[in-house]
Image (cartoon, rainbow, N blue to C red):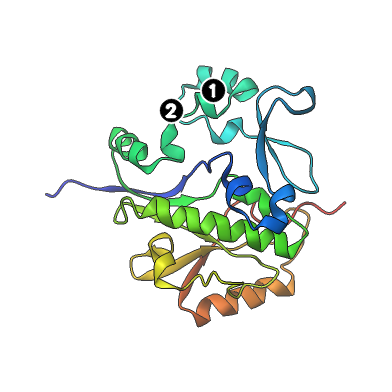
Amino acid sequence: MAELQLISSDSHVSEPPDLWVERIDTKYRDRAPRVVLNPEGQEGAYLVYEGYPPHNLAIGLGAGRTPEELAAFLKTGTYADARPGGWDPAQRLPDMELDGVEAEVLYTTLGFRLFWLKDAGLQRACFRVYNDWLAAYCSYAPKRLKGLALISLYDPRPQGGHDLVLPACRPALQLGDLRSVLGGGAGPGHARQPPRHHRHGAYSVGIQCRKTRHALNGYPPRN
């Protein structure tokens, strides 16, 4: 019998802390999401993004730790303490060998919170940056790393100069012979999906693109 191959259908990248600050359109540079250390007297690494309090990132950086180690890491952990495979694909492959995983479907980590951004233009600009970076990340081992692009629900069609179905983007968008994208759920506090979700679903079908969802990539709770 051939040896069974394990595929992780819910793995995550750790976006570089300066990803959006360095790459986003100039007009959004001052508003770009960013990682900061010890903001406002809080200890650890935090994502600062428009319209919401800083969000502690340690939970997304704690791979490879025992439960006892993780408890301490969640209080003060930073990128300096994390496994670099989250943002360096060359370092990820040895981690996959250690776990006995042949291939991984890769979700965002920081990008979940960016579905909450209220400015559609800023959100689309952030998603373009992430999708370009993810395509490059997955191109290191395209048969083993399968990334899920981020699609703005304000308008699911390709925006600006970044067409999500262009061949250059396909390394980050393919699962088998199907492109895949990460759309949004209705979100906590929402009883049903707003109309934009239905437009997104219809557009995904139109470009033969598989849509997936994940906890936290909906809308924030209603006040």
Q: Is residue 163 above or below residue 92?
A: below
Residue 190, horizontal then vertical, whole percent: 77, 60
Position above or below: 72 against 18: above
Left or right: where 155 falls relative to 1: right
Q: Which residue is mark 1?
A: 70
- Comparing 102 with 174, the one in front is 174
**Residue positioned 76% across, 62% down in the render:** 191
Q: Give the crowd class for mark 2: few <14, some 14-19, many >=20 residues within 10 Å.
A: few
In front of the other: 194 or 25: 25
The disc at residue 116 is: none
Task: Find residue 40 and report its horizontal and vertical position in percent.
Answer: 79, 27
Horizontal relation, residue 136 to residue 103: left or right: right
Mark drawn on residue 64: 2
- Does residue 185 appear anywhere in the picture? no
Quarter of the rendering containing residue 90:
top left
The amino acid at mark 2 is: Gly
Q: Image quadrant of residue 136?
A: bottom left
Indicate the amino acid at tag 1: Leu
